[in-house]
Image (cartoon, helix red, strand yellow):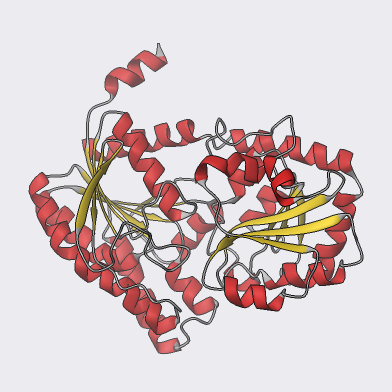
Amino acid sequence: MTAWLWSHARFSMRILIVGINYAPELTGVGKYTGEMAEWLAAAGHELHVVTAPPYYPEWRVADGYASWRYSKEVRKGVSIWRCPIWVPSRPSGLKRLLHLASFALCSLPVMISQMFWRPSVILAIEPTLFCAPAALMCAKLSGAKAWLHVQDFEIDAAFELGILRSKLLHSVVGKAESWLMCCFDRVSTISGSMLNLLSTKDVTAKTELLPNWVDTQNIFPMSRASVYREELGIEDDKCVAMYSGNMGEKQGLEVLLAAAKSLQHESRLLFVLCGAGAARKRLMQMGAELQNVRWLPLQPVEKLNELMNLADVHLLPQRADAAGLVMPSKLLGMFASGRPVLATAHPGTQLAKMVSSCGRVVEPGNAQEVAQALLELMNTPQERERLGMEARKAAQLWDKSSVLRDFESQLQTLCNK
């Protein structure tokens, strides 16, 4: 009876999403934005997306796209407008700001044209907050509701990581951020600790928890060895400790290289570092002499489950100064693969709470603790199996369909007001 009432209470919405990253075939923010839009379109809603050409995490516009022109495409029922953007090959603090500002400026004409479509709700995805003013303006003029979803607190992270340094700028930008957030009808974010951080910013708009999700049907523990073991020539008795994802500055991947260096004598342990990003070249140079480290580029999405099952232990480092500001989107995929996770996080953080029952949590930046925890997991296969089972159970709490059904219901409640 409840399912019948829910299905008959639904109505079609026109949803406009503006976000700099839209790439369902990759990982991170772009993946979640894309999957969200495609799921809502499949549920019967009209979806328009204003975004940039795919460029992340390589910081290079993908083949088939251009950074200097507008284009439109339709994918799985979603109409996508891609706007020009300046993509620096070596992003720095100032260059990142100009990069974000270029998209906000170039996307403005498209956002204005979308007002005539009369959307029911405009959903702005942070990053980037630069698009928030345009989203609010278009919502006001078109009569739409305005929703801000925070995947990363990009401003706080930029200052905590030293990308931006001026205290005066931090104060001014922080006040502008709080004011903008208060102008939205709803503000959501992806974890409890990030929801608490919203409260410290004096956000008066109603806040919601919209966690990331995982497709547990596409990522699952396999009963056989991953094809990557044969392709890479990895012996069956080797324990693979793997990091897969963006190789940027906030990940703190240096600690993995330091741990690998201290464990060179352990012939049964192999580190696999897979992904792309602004720090990849520098990291490869740092680890050039390490024989127990393998480097892989980004892998095709159709081989994602094989890749996740390559790991005996998933590695999830984070810099200490980024704790609480971001929640790694890759974590749930690690859980879904049924493998334990070794994370670096301070006790009491959201990341530490989530990983504690599914793996090991050590102090950020402490290579010795990372190495010791890896040795313990390598030498206790039964414990790895137990932790992996707990990880799989945890992943099912954030199944994609369940999370997005709840989000759809929240959108409809907002539009009814």
Where is the C terminus found, in terms of image quarters?
A: top left
- In this rendering, the answer to whether 265 lies above or below 208 is below
The image shows a total of numbered marks equal to 0
Out of 146 and 124, give the one closest to the viewer: 124
- In this rendering, the answer to whether 317 lies above or below 40 is below
Residue at left offset 80%, top offset 67%: 291
Residue at left offset 40%, top offset 88%: 168
Q: Residue at the far left: name it.
A: 116
The percent position of residue 260, horizontal first and vertical second, equals 80, 67
Query: In which image quadrant can residue 119 be found?
Result: top left
Residue at left offset 64%, top offset 45%: 307
Out of 67 and 218, give the one closest to the viewer: 67
Q: Is residue 380 visible?
A: yes
The percent position of residue 162, horizontal first and vertical second, equals 53, 82
Residue at left offset 82%, top offset 43%: 384
The percent position of residue 33, horizontal first and vertical second, equals 38, 48
Q: Residue at the far top: name it.
A: 1
Q: Left or right: 87 with respect to 189?
A: left
Out of 335 and 160, give the one closest to the viewer: 335
Out of 64 and 29, give the one closest to the viewer: 64
Q: Left or right: 311 with respect to 381?
A: left
Where is the N terminus found, in terms of image quarters?
A: top left
Q: Left or right: 287 with respect to 25?
A: right
